[in-house]
Amino acid sequence: MRSHPESFVHVSLDEIRGQLFGDPAIQGEWSAIWQRVKSQCSHASSQRKNVIYDATNYKKKYRLEVIELLRNYEFKPITGIYLQVPLWICLSRNQTRDRQVPEDVIIEMHRCLTLNPPRLDEGFDRLLVQEDKPESEWID
């Protein structure tokens, strides 16, 4: 795997929503978004570039769909990154964002991820889990 930035394609659902609907906050029609995801992955594959798929994927079915797509384009290894963040930190950070997510959406996403966190048996080759702690718990 090459490590310089031009060897990666950043596939961001927020960027795609912004391109398609003029605002990343507009959820829009999923089929149009998914078509753009597939197109970007296809292009990356044909250019022999890696993909960074940037999305919350808080439901297992979403993760399975993306993993299947990446496997179909023969990307490997497929590495998932799971950031375990306490709900109160998510809600606090949301308050400082320019584009805030409705609180009930964050609570539901957090609940789904807590009940069904990403797992290797979903098809990941590697799964990196990073626990995010408040600064008061950091060890120097």
Image (spheres, rainbow, N blue to C red):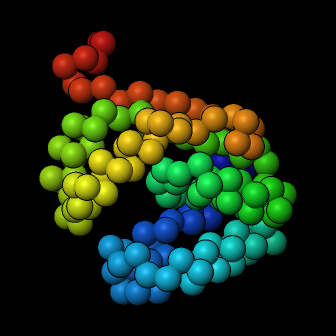
Q: In this rendering, is residue 6 above or below 67? A: below
> Where's residue 98, x and y in %?
19, 64
Q: Is residue 80 above or below residue 52?
A: above
In screen coordinates, is 26 left or right of 47? left
Choose top left, top right, bottom left or bottom right for residue 99. Answer: bottom left
* In the foreground, 109 or 98: 109
Residue at x 59% of width, y 81% of height = 31
Q: Residue at x 24, y 37 (%)?
A: 89
- Say left or right for 86 vs 126: left
Is residue 19 shown to the viewer in this render?
no
Q: Residue at x 28, y 18 (%)?
A: 138
* Image position, residue 14 (x, y; %): 43, 69
The answer to whether residue 60 is seen in the rendering is: yes
Where residue 18 appears, x then y in whole percent? Answer: 40, 79
Q: Quadrant of the C terminus?
A: top left
Farthest residue in the bottom direction?
21
Residue displayed at 22% across by 37% down: 88
Q: Name the quadrant containing residue 40.
A: bottom right
